Image (cartoon, helix red, strand yellow):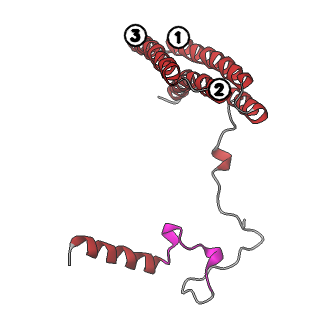
Amino acid sequence: MNRYAIAMIVVAAAIGMAGGYWLGLKSPSRESASSPITMRPPTPAEPAEEPSLAPLQQPPHAIDQMVAEAAEEYGASSYTAAVHAKAEGLWDQEMNASYQNLMKAFPTELQGQLRTTQRAWITFRDEQKLLLESFYDHYRPNGTLWMSDHAANDMIITKRRAEDLSLLSWAKDFCP
């Protein structure tokens, strides 16, 4: 018997012994009365729901909310493209604010590295936008969907950098 066959038998046996719980194949709410593992019903003092990560999740950023509302109301349109362009400017402001805060907070050697990476990112951003422009010029897709898509792709470049700098700013506050 080869190693693969042995591994499959071991995995099948583990699934059978664990009752499928660890793979999500079986849950306590669906288990049968004949199951060897029984769960007691929740008491009033216990929550009946499974734990959730929802309290740990942050609400969407105000800029993302603005874009989502425009997309929901207007779909892919020239208006949505304009909203993406506005959002790109707002992300740029956020990125610049985070950059300035980091430059004030960082020691000299980190300021130099941050300045170097920001200049490299600006070069990357400009080249990425040229690539997107060339892509849309080459394929010439018609319709407002593509206009909105192009504006969204431009916005995402700046949004990602703004988020990166924001996380770096957040992390420095928690370092000893």
Q: Secondary structure at mark 1?
A: helix
Circle 3 sits on which residue? 112
Does residue 37 lie above or below 123 as drawn?
A: below
Circle 2 sits on which residue? 148
Q: Position of residue 95 (x, y in %)?
A: 57, 17
Q: Position of residue 104 (x, y in %)?
A: 53, 11
User: Is mark 2 in CB contact (under 8 Å) with mark 1?
Assistant: no
Q: Earlier in the sequence, mark 2 or mark 1?
A: 1
Is 146 situated left or right of 1 in this image? right
Q: Earlier in the sequence, mark 1 or mark 3?
A: 1
Is 154 situated left or right of 128 in this image? right
The answer for how far apart the CA atoms under marks 1 and 3 are is 12 Å
The front one of 22 and 91 is 91
Q: Secondary structure at mark 3?
A: helix
Circle 1 sits on which residue? 104
Does residue 58 lie above or below 137 as drawn?
A: below
Task: Inspect the image, locate mark 3, and give the three-letter code of the amino acid beneath it.
Answer: Gly
The quadrant of the picture occupied by the N terminus is: bottom left
Is 157 situated left or right of 114 in this image? right
Task: Inspect the image, locate mark 1, and give the three-letter code of the amino acid beneath it.
Answer: Lys
| Residue at figure coordinates x 54%, y 87% from the top left | 36
Q: Position of residue 164 (x, y in %)?
A: 51, 26
Front tag of 2 and 1? 2
The answer for how far apart the CA atoms under marks 2 and 1 are is 37 Å
The front one of 150 and 116 is 150
| Residue at figure coordinates x 53%, y 26% from the top left | 160
Image-quadrant location for residue 86: top right
The front one of 65 and 39 is 65
Front tag of 1 and 3? 3
Which region of the structure is painted magenta?
19-32
Q: Earlier in the sequence, mark 2 or mark 3?
A: 3
Q: Position of residue 18 (x, y in %)?
A: 46, 76
